[in-house]
Image (cartoon, helix red, strand yellow):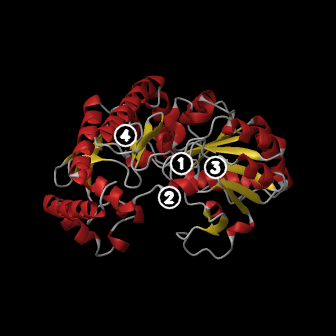
C-alpha cells in the first residue's frame, strides 16, 4: 500500500520539476490559450498529467522530442495511432509522392486495389470499405447492421470504447444502465436502442440475445480502454456461437487489439466475426480506418441498397478513402505492419512485461501486469479485472498521475490514462530497460 501523503508529495515535487524544465512549452501554452478553447486544438491533449501541455517538436520511430529539446522513449505512440512507430520511412515516402500528385479526387487509385487485396488476405474477410476514422467506421457498421437485420438494438460491454459513437456511451452502474456522464449534448436516450452488459458474462449475453431484437454485438476481443480486461477461456467462442444462433451480427473492433498479431486478435486467435473495424494505425498515423465484412453480409447490404433510394446513406464523408490515405495505407500494410515487425514487437513486449513484474515484486507490491501482444499495462491491484465494473474499481487516479508525471520528467512516455504501454517495431531493448529502471526509481521514491 502506498501512502496518500507520499503520492501528494511526489505530485507536488514533479509538477515543480516539470514547470522548471519546460519553459518553451509553458510559453506556447500561454500563447495557445488566446484562441484555442481550453488552450489546445483538441481536448484530449489535456489528458496528460502535466501542469500545462507538453508541446511536441518531432517524433521518429519510438522516440519523441519536445520543444524544449528533451528526448523521450515513447511507449504511448499516439495512443495506438503510431503503434508501428512514428513516421515509418515507407509511409513518409508514400506521403511525399502522393502529396505532389493530389490529395483527394473522389476517385479510386491503383493503391486501392493493393490495399483491398492486402486487407482481405490478412484479416480473412473478402469485402472492405474505407472511412476517415474508427469512430466513423463504427457508426457505419452500426447503421449497416440495423439496416440489414431490421433490428434497432446494439449490444456493447460495460466500459467499452468504440470512439465518438453516441450509441455506445452507456455504462452499468450498480447493475443498471446509465448514460455515460461525459456524453455532451445528448438529446435522446440511447438506452432505448443500446443494451449494455458486463464482459465475460455469458448468462447475461444469452438473455439479452434471446429477445431477437439485437442487430449486432460490437466488441473488442479484449477490452483495452478501461484498463485491460482479457476474455475468459472459451468466452469469445461462446459469443460467436450465441450471436450466430440468434441471428445477431458479431462485429470486432480491433483498433487496439491489432497489437495481438499479424491478423489482429480474431484472425490470429479467433473466432472470426461478421464484420471488422480497424482505425488509427492502419495508415501509419494518417487519419484513416477500414471496415470489412463477409460475403453474406455484403449480399445483404446490396439487397438493402436495392430496396431504397440511391444517394446519401448517412455513411461516409467526401474525404473518406482519399488518395493520400490510400497511399499511406498501402505503404503501412505492405512494408510496415509486416510479420517481421510482429516478430520484433511481441517478444520484446513479453520481455517488458517480465521486467515490470520484476520491478513490482522487488518493491513488495501486489500489482499485476497484463498484455495482449505488443500492448501491455501494469495495474495497481493484485487481481486482474474480468469486466468493466471491476476494472474501474481498480483505478487509482492520484497514484497513476504521480507515476505518469515522474516518468515524463525522466524522459519516458506511457499512455496518459491507465498505465498502458506499446512496443513498436522501432522500440529497443535499451528503451524497455529504461522504462523498467525509471518505474523502479519511482516506486522506490513512493515507498520510501
Front residue (pair 140, 422):
422
**Crowding at label 1, few (<14), some or many (≥20) Cα neighbours within 10 Å?**
some
Q: Are marks 2 and 4 in contact (CB under 8 Å)?
A: no
Provide the secondary structure element on which disc 1 rests.
Answer: loop
Give the residue at x 35% y 64%.
46
Work out whether 113 lies above or below 317.
above
Q: Is residue 382 left or right of residue 410?
A: right
Give the residue at x 71% y 55%.
155
Residue that badge 4 annotates: 96
Residue 328's spot in the image, x, y percent? Answer: 46, 39
Q: Is residue 248 left or right of residue 360?
A: right
Q: Are marks 4 and 1 in contact (CB under 8 Å)?
A: no
Query: Mark 1 or 2 closer to N-term?
Result: 1
Q: Give how far apart the Cα atoms at labels 1 and 2 are.
A: 9 Å
Work out whether 377 lies above or below 178.
above
Q: Give how far apart the Cα atoms at labels 3 and 4 are.
A: 43 Å
Residue that badge 3 annotates: 199
Query: Mark 1 or 3 closer to N-term?
Result: 3
Front residue (pair 293, 47):
47
Provide the secondary structure element on which disc 4 rests.
Answer: helix
Q: Give how far apart the Cα atoms at labels 4 and 1 are.
A: 45 Å
Q: Is residue 261 left or right of residue 20?
A: right
Q: Give how far apart the Cα atoms at labels 2 and 3 are.
A: 15 Å
Question: Given this view, does label 4 or label 1 mark the residue nearer the observer?
Answer: 1
Front residue (pair 131, 196):
196
Question: Given this view, does label 1 or label 3 mark the residue nearer the observer?
Answer: 1
Residue 441's spot in the image, x, y percent? Answer: 21, 45
Image disc number at residue 385: 1
Residue that badge 2 annotates: 393
Amino acid at each position: 500500500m502506498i501512502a496518500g501523503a507520499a503520492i501528494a508529495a511526489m505530485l507536488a515535487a514533479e509538477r515543480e520539476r516539470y514547470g522548471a524544465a519546460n519553459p518553451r512549452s509553458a510559453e506556447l501554452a500561454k500563447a495557445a490559450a488566446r484562441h484555442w478553447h481550453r488552450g489546445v486544438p483538441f481536448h484530449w491533449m489535456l489528458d496528460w498529467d502535466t501542469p500545462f501541455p507538453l508541446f511536441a517538436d518531432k517524433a521518429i520511430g519510438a522516440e519523441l522530442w519536445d520543444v524544449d529539446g528533451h528526448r523521450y522513449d515513447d511507449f504511448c505512440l499516439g495512443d495506438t495511432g503510431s503503434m508501428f512507430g512514428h513516421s515509418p520511412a515507407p509511409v513518409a515516402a508514400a506521403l511525399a509522392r502522393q502529396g505532389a500528385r493530389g490529395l483527394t479526387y473522389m476517385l479510386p487509385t491503383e493503391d486501392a486495389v493493393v490495399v483491398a487485396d492486402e486487407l482481405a488476405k490478412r484479416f480473412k474477410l473478402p469485402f472492405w470499405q474505407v472511412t476517415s476514422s474508427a469512430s466513423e467506421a463504427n457508426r457505419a457498421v452500426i447503421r449497416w447492421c440495423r439496416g440489414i437485420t431490421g433490428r434497432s438494438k446494439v449490444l456493447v460491454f460495460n466500459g467499452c470504447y468504440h470512439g465518438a459513437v453516441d450509441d455506445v456511451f452507456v455504462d452499468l452502474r450498480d447493475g443498471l444502465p446509465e448514460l455515460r456522464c461525459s456524453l455532451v449534448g445528448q438529446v435522446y436516450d440511447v438506452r432505448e436502442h443500446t443494451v449494455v452488459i458486463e464482459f465475460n458474462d455469458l448468462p447475461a449475453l444469452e438473455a439479452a440475445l434471446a429477445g431477437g431484437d439485437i442487430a449486432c454485438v460490437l466488441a473488442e476481443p479484449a477490452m483495452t480502454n478501461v484498463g485491460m480486461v482479457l476474455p475468459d477461456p472459451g468466452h469469445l467462442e461462446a459469443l460467436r456461437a450465441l450471436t450466430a444462433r440468434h441471428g445477431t451480427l458479431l462485429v470486432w473492433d480491433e483498433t487496439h487489439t491489432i497489437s495481438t498479431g499479424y491478423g489482429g486478435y480474431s484472425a490470429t486467435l479467433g473466432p472470426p466475426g461478421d464484420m471488422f473495424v480497424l482505425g488509427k494505425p492502419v495508415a501509419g498515423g494518417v487519419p484513416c480506418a477500414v471496415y470489412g465484412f463477409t460475403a453474406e453480409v455484403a449480399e445483404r447490404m446490396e439487397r438493402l441498397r436495392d430496396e431504397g433510394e440511391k444517394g446519401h446513406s448517412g455513411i461516409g464523408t467526401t474525404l473518406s478513402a482519399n488518395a493520400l490515405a490510400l497511399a499511406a495505407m498501402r505503404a503501412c500494410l505492405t512494408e510496415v505492419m509486416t510479420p517481421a515487425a510482429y516478430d520484433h514487437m511481441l517478444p520484446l513486449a513479453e520481455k517488458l512485461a517480465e521486467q515490470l513484474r520484476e520491478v513490482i515484486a522487488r518493491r513488495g507490491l501486489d500489482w499485476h501486469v497484463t498484455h495482449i501482444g505488443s500492448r501491455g499495462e501494469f495495474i495497481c491491484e493484485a487481481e486482474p479485472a474480468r469486466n468493466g465494473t471491476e476494472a474501474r474499481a481498480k483505478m487509482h487516479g492520484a497514484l497513476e498521475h504521480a507515476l505518469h508525471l515522474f516518468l515524463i520528467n525522466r524522459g519516458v512516455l506511457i499512455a496518459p490514462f491507465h498505465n498502458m504501454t506499446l512496443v513498436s517495431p522501432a522500440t529497443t531493448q535499451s528503451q524497455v530497460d529504461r522504462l523498467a529502471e525509471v518505474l523502479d526509481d519511482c516506486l522506490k521514491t513512493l515507498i520510501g
